[in-house]
Image (cartoon, rainbow, N blue to C red):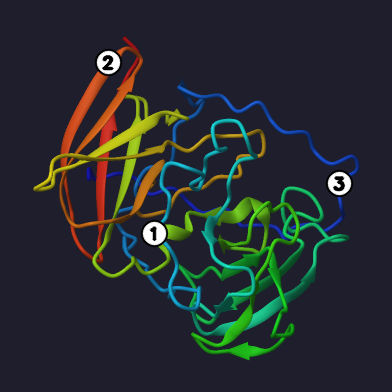
Amino acid sequence: MPTVTPLPSPATPTPGRACPQPPPPKPDYQRNVLGEWPWPTPDTAVPQSHFWLTDPVLGGRKPLANGYYPYGWDGDGRFLLHNGADMPAVRGTLVTAVADGTVVVTQSDAEELYGWRCDWYGQLVVLELDQQWQGQPVYVLYGHVQQIQVEAGQRVAQGDPIAEIGVEGVSAVPHLHLEVRVGSNGFATTQNPMLWLEPLPGTGVLAGRLVDGAGRPWQGVRITLIESTADGPVYHYTFTYLDDPQHLIHPDAALAENFLFADLPPGNYTLFVSVAGQEYRLPVVVNEGAVTAVEIMAGLP
């Protein structure tokens, strides 16, 4: 990645908890468009890897469906912008502490704001990690849970029971919604949790940037990743991060990514994108347990 100028990190205010009335309307997310302002640039002084968090799902989570509802995407208009990662499992499956820390929230959000609106997660647990990131606190939110087994103020060790997977709040099927919040425990401070969770065994992560020459991000663009295998090509896809009026989606400081593939088998791939009438292809190599960083600069014709 090129050498770039780090951006300062502004202080993050403590979020308010009053329920908005009326609830905010769903924004009109724009796809296949350039952002109005330049995207953050990678900070080469910051370590790229911070896989601090272990798998929270007892028995092991499933590989992330990169193309369905990843961080920063709205499910092709079906949902609101996603601020975390979803991990489906049977209702009642135990979820555990992803790291050592202190429980700071265990409650319903029916009357206090922790998400897009109240009663967003139904029941939630928030863990503040012992370890800080660049001097900032790190919080991990567990949403849509049931049978909470901890209480606020309790110390937990990595692997301790936290709660069970449920269908509370805005949830149609049993799953854990996991968020990573950096700086403060607010909905507007999330980052992509797949850059914090340990990759599944035998997999790696690809973090990329799709920007124009002025550094503006392409939003809502489909990204295709073609895996070379002995049995022929395997296709993976995801989307570049969308934006909304509150600018709720944030990249990692070191990578400044605006798209990500998680849980990839190591090996050789071709990254393909078609944007503004132009096609781009880039060979990439994914390594086990590591992040591969790529950038495609794509301007308007």
| Quarter of the image where one finds residue 266 | bottom left
In the image, what residue occupies the spot 56% across and 24% down?
A: 30
Q: Which of marks 3 and 2 is nearer the N terminus?
A: 3
In the image, what residue occupies the spot 41% across and 74% down?
A: 52
In the image, what residue occupies the spot 64% across and 63% down?
A: 184
- The location of residue 293, given as percent across then percent down, is 26, 49
- Nearer the observer: mark 3 or 1; the answer is 1
- The location of residue 125, given as percent across then percent down, is 68, 72
- The location of residue 188, given as percent across then percent down, is 64, 51
Q: Distance between the residues labelled 3 and 1?
A: 35 Å
Q: How far apart are marks 1 and 2 (CA)?
A: 31 Å
- The location of residue 277, given as percent across then percent down, is 32, 12
Residue furthest to the top in view is 301
Amino acid at circle 3:
Pro
Total labels drawn: 3
Q: Mark 3 points at which residue?
A: 20
Establish if 162 lies above or below 85: below
The secondary element bearing badge 2 is classed as strand
| Quarter of the image where one finds residue 13 | bottom right
The secondary element bearing badge 1 is classed as loop
In the image, what residue occupies the spot 57% across and 76% down?
A: 95
Q: Earlier in the sequence, mark 1 or mark 2?
A: 1
Q: Mark 1 points at which residue?
A: 63
Q: Kindly check if marks 3 and 1 are in contact, taking CB atoms under 8 A apart as contact.
A: no
Which image quadrant: the C terminus? top left
Q: Earlier in the sequence, mark 3 or mark 1?
A: 3
Q: Kindly check if marks 1 and 2 are in contact, taking CB atoms under 8 A apart as contact.
A: no
Q: Mark 2 points at which residue?
A: 278
